[in-house]
Amino acid sequence: MNALSHIIEVLQHGLVLDVTIEELQFRAYVVVSEPDIDRVADFVPKEQFEQDGDVHVAAIYEEQDAREQVQDITFNMNPGDAAVFLCVNPAAYLAALEELGQAAAEPAD
C-alpha cells in the first residue's frame, strides 16, 4: 500500500489529510484520542457528515496495529468517504500517519 497525502488542517491533537491510495481519494482525520465514537464530532466538521459518502471510524491501540487498521478501513471505502483514526497514544498516531503517507510528526497540543 503506497499512500500519498498532504495536510489540510492541523487540529489540537492531530491532523486532517487528503489521502490518495491507488485510485482511492479520501479525507482522513488522524488524532490522539480515547477510542470513543462520541469524540468524532469534536474534530470532524458537521459538513463532512452532510456530504455524500460515509464516515468510517477506527481505533488504533498500538503502533503495530496501524497498518492493518488503515488497510481494513480503506478496503471498505468508496470515493468521497472519510476516515477517522482515533489513536490511543502518540506511537499509534505516528504509525497511522506513516501508513497514510506522512513523515513522523508529533501531534499539535
Image: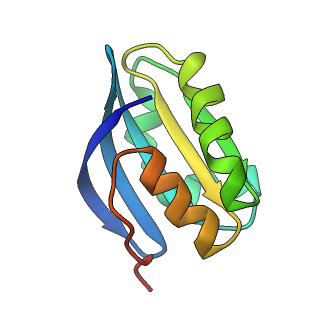
Q: Position of residue 44 (x, y in %)?
A: 47, 50
User: Against 109, is 14 above or below?
Assistant: above
User: Against 99, is 72 above or below?
Assistant: above
The image quadrant that residue 19 belongs to is: top left
Residue sitting nearer the eye, 109 or 23 = 23
Q: Position of residue 46 (x, y in %)?
A: 45, 44
User: Against 65, is 55 above or below?
Assistant: above
Residue beneath the point at 71% across and 49% down? 65
The image quadrant that residue 26 belongs to is: top left
Residue beneath the point at 25% across and 55% down? 7
Q: How many marks?
A: 0
Residue beneath the point at 53% across and 25% down? 74
Quadrant placement of the N terminus: top left
- Residue furthest bottom as drawn: 109
Residue sitting nearer the eye, 71 or 51 = 71
Which colouring convention does the figure follow?
rainbow
Q: Is residue 42 at least partly visible in the picture?
A: yes
* For residue 18, side relative to residue 87 (left or right): left
Quadrant placement of the C terminus: bottom left
* For residue 16, side relative to residue 58 (left or right): left
Q: Is residue 44 at least partly visible in the picture?
A: no
The image quadrant that residue 35 belongs to is: bottom right
Q: Position of residue 58 (x, y in %)?
A: 68, 42
Q: Position of residue 4 (x, y in %)?
A: 28, 38
Residue beneath the point at 43% across and 54% down? 98
* For residue 49, side relative to residue 90 (left or right): left
Residue sitting nearer the eye, 53 or 102 = 102
